Every structure is written in structure tokens, then in C-alpha cells.
Image (cartoon, rainbow, N blue to C red):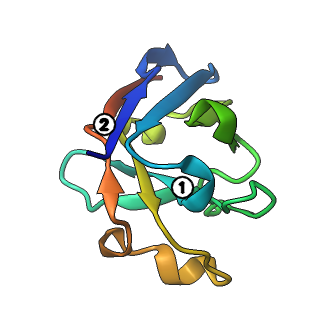
Amino acid sequence: QVQLVESGGGSEESGGSLRLSCRVSGLILHDYEMGWFRQAPGKEREAVSFISKSGLGTYYPDSVKGRFTISRENAKNTLYLQMNTLKPEDTAMYYCVSRPSDTTTWSSLLSPTRWNYWGQGTQVTVSS
């Protein structure tokens, strides 16, 4: 059974930092692309970041580029998201996702339906 368990969320002031972790079980992490989505109340889920199987390829939308960094430790079956210079608009539930493929075009993965496995989410709240 595949499980993705996020942790590290919480409340932070604007300008602060948080580090999210996603512990994965039931699959061999180096065979999977990984990523993070987020969903704010009343809004659709949006892609936050993706990382290739090797960790050499990453994707960030303009909204988080330069502030967020995705990384992975395949040996520990863990995915991370370092979030710096947080803004109130980063407030959302953050979800860890995975899929057993190797994609060359990140734009094709922006739809949540392209991802096979999802965690339960961890809440991030940023106050101004």
C-alpha cells in the first residue's frame, strides 16, 4: 500500500520559512517523479513544484520561483519543500504527490489528474 505522509506545516509570519517533508512508503522513491500541490480555500489545486526521478530536473511556477526549493532523498524515501520568504498568499493545504513516470515536459503535469498518489496534506498558514 502506497502512503505519502506530509509534515512540517504550521503557522508562520510573512517573511518567515517553513520546511515541509513527505515520507513515502510502499514504493521505491527513485522510480517516481515527485511534486507538491497546494489548495487554498475556495480555489483550485495548483502546482507548487516538481522534481525528476534523479533530482536533477525541477519545476516552479512564477508564484514561488526563487522562494521555494524542492529536493529529495531517495535513500530515505523522503521529499522536501523548503519555503522561504513566505507570503500570506502561500496560505493553503500542501499536498505531496507522486507518479511512476519520467516526464520531459513539466507543463504536461500541471493538472492534478496526472498524479497517481496523494498525501493527506499539511496546512500552511502565513500571517501578514
**Above-or-below relation of 70 to 100:** above
Q: Is residue 69 among the parts visible in the rendering?
A: no
**Above-or-below relation of 1 to 80:** below
Q: What is the three-letter code of the residue carrying label 2? A: Gly
Residue 28 in the image, given as x and y percentages of width and height: 52, 49
Query: Is residue 107 toward the left or the right of residue 125 in the image?
Result: right
Residue 52 in the image, given as x and y percentages of width and height: 67, 62
Residue 85 in the image, given as x and y percentages of width and height: 67, 30
Tally of numbered discs:
2
Q: Quadrant of residue 58?
A: bottom right
**Above-or-below relation of 1 to 12:** below
Q: Residue at x 47, y 39 (%)?
A: 90
Q: Earlier in the sequence, mark 2 or mark 1?
A: 1
Question: Pointer 2 and pointer 1: residues touching (CB < 8 Å)?
Answer: no
Secondary structure beneath dot 1 equals strand
Residue 107 in the image, given as x and y percentages of width and height: 56, 81
Q: Is residue 67 among the parts visible in the rendering?
A: yes
> In the picture, which quadrant includes the N terminus?
top left
Q: Which mark is residue 121?
A: 2
| Residue topped by disc 1 | 34
Q: Which mark is residue 58?
A: none
In the image, farthest residue toward the left: 42
Q: What is the three-letter code of the residue carrying label 1? A: Met
